[in-house]
């Protein structure tokens, strides 16, 4: 537990400059870059009415800890009823004040401060296996796990062994049948939202609300670089795939996707791994019923778990965590819109749902 020299309180706009300085220990030394990132993430989010965060303030040193939350709107795919939630996000504690319980104190303070704000739960989709027991002690439950499916070109396989130069084109166009497919470095929020609106949602699931306003904001993340692939039939958008540039040259992570007809996503993946120059793509594998896994396997994606075991590089599956915002949750708190948050089958999860993209 944090000692009496610290006060936990809600973050305010006036705290932004100090938090940007503090985040040098997490995000990097460019304070202006940190300011842009924090403004985008916590101040400009259209699904939030204000920034949602807790700071730890020391009586002498000022703000020495920050714990941010990203509000998001989820919908029951059956009724369209909205279920607002908070997602655990950036956490930073000054190096001189670590190992004093501030991480736990800020997390507990969030339950107290935000418990009556209308949000139904706090989700954490970007933790690793090691911190999960600590969250469980504070009331979180694991509702699933995610891994990755991967598709590599031959050049991508070789690049895993040899440091080959890889050039990725950012714009290109291709055809597959009567589909016109394009790859661009700028989003098309209206077209993407139109595809999501027409796509068949997984029945009886909580799905992230992705409309044009959301997409206008979502890809303003100054810390990431994205590529957008879109398929049209005539004037009508029928599929899209969003790729976040990964660490290795020419590789990327598919963080968002939708299609209104079968084959649209497969056409876009072929273009990304062909004319667009990507040598490898990965995608979250977190579907409880295998529907998304079947989609991606039909596009040539495979698990690398067997290979990792062979070279003894297996990692534990990454947990997906959720906790109602109620201080002492009862049964009904776990079931907004009649969907049990503890069941994998209540969710449709892709990487864009996570704070980590």
Image (cartoon, rainbow, N blue to C red):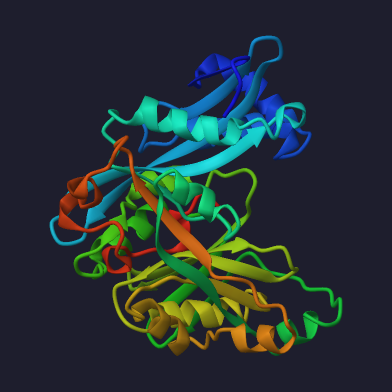
Q: Is residue 64 above or below residue 152?
A: above
Which residue is rendered at x = 27% and y = 58% of the image? 206
Residue at 46% x, 57% y: name it.
Answer: 352
Q: Residue furthest right?
A: 163
- In the image, residue 222 lies at what x, y percent? 62, 43
Q: Is residue 141 left or right of residue 300?
A: left
Does any portion of residue 42 appear in the rendered image? yes
Q: Residue at image x 37%, y 33%?
A: 48
Image-based side of 218 in relation to 212, left or right = right
Residue 49 appears anywhere in the view: no
Q: Is residue 222 above or below residue 294?
A: above
Q: Position of residue 351 (x, y in %)?
A: 48, 61
Q: Nearer the viewer, residue 288 or 104?
A: 104
Viewer-proximal residue among 31 and 143: 143
Q: Is residue 265 left or right of residue 207?
A: right
Indicate the quadrant where residue 298 lies. bottom left
Q: Residue 330 at x, y = what percent?
A: 22, 44
Q: Quadrant of the C terminus?
A: bottom right
Q: Nearer the viewer, residue 136 or 296?
A: 136
Q: Nearer the viewer, residue 160 or 86?
A: 86
Query: In terms of image quadrants, where is residue 62?
Result: top right
Residue 168 shown left or right of residue 297 in the figure: right
What residue is shown at x 52% (from left), y 78% (from top)?
Answer: 269
Image x and y of residue 341, in percent:
29, 56
Residue 109 versus residue 336 in the image, above or below: above
Quadrant of image for the N terminus:
top right
Tell me the quarter of the picture where residue 277 sits. Answer: bottom right
């Amino acid at each position: 537990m944090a000692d009496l020299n610290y006060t936990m309180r809600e973050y305010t706009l006036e705290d932004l400059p100090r938090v940007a300085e503090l985040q040098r220990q997490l995000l990097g030394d460019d304070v202006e870059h940190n300011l842009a990132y924090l403004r985008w993430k916590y101040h400009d989010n259209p699904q939030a009415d204000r920034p949602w965060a807790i700071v730890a303030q020391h009586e002498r040193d000022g703000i020495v800890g920050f714990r941010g939350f990203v509000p998001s709107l989820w919908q029951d795919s059956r009724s369209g009823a909205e279920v607002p939630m908070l997602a655990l996000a950036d956490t930073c504690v000054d190096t001189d004040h670590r190992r004093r319980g501030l991480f736990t104190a800020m997390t507990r303070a969030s339950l107290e401060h935000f418990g009556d704000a209308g949000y139904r739960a706090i989700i954490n989709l970007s933790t690793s296996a090691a911190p999960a027991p600590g969250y469980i002690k504070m009331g979180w439950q694991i509702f699933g796990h995610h891994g990755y499916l991967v598709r590599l070109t031959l050049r991508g396989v070789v690049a895993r062994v040899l440091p080959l130069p890889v050039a990725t084109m950012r714009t290109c166009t291709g055809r597959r049948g009567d589909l016109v497919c394009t790859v661009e470095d700028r989003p098309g929020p209206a077209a993407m939202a139109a595809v999501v609106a027409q796509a068949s949602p997984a029945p009886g699931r909580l799905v992230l609300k992705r409309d044009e306003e959301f997409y206008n904001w979502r890809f303003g993340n100054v810390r990431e670089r994205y590529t957008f692939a879109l398929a049209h039939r005539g004037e009508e958008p029928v599929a899209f795939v969003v790729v976040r540039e990964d660490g290795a040259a020419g590789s990327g992570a598919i963080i968002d996707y939708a299609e209104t007809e079968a084959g649209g996503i497969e056409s876009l993946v072929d273009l990304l791994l062909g004319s667009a120059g990507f040598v490898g793509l990965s995608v979250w594998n977190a579907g409880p019923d295998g529907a998304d896994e079947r989609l991606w396997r039909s596009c040539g994606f495979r698990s690398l778990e067997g290979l990792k075991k062979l070279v003894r590089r297996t990692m534990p599956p990454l947990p997906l965590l959720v906790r109602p915002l109620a201080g002492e949750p009862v049964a009904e708190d776990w079931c907004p819109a009649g969907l049990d948050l503890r069941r994998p089958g209540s969710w449709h999860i892709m990487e864009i749902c996570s704070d980590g993209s």
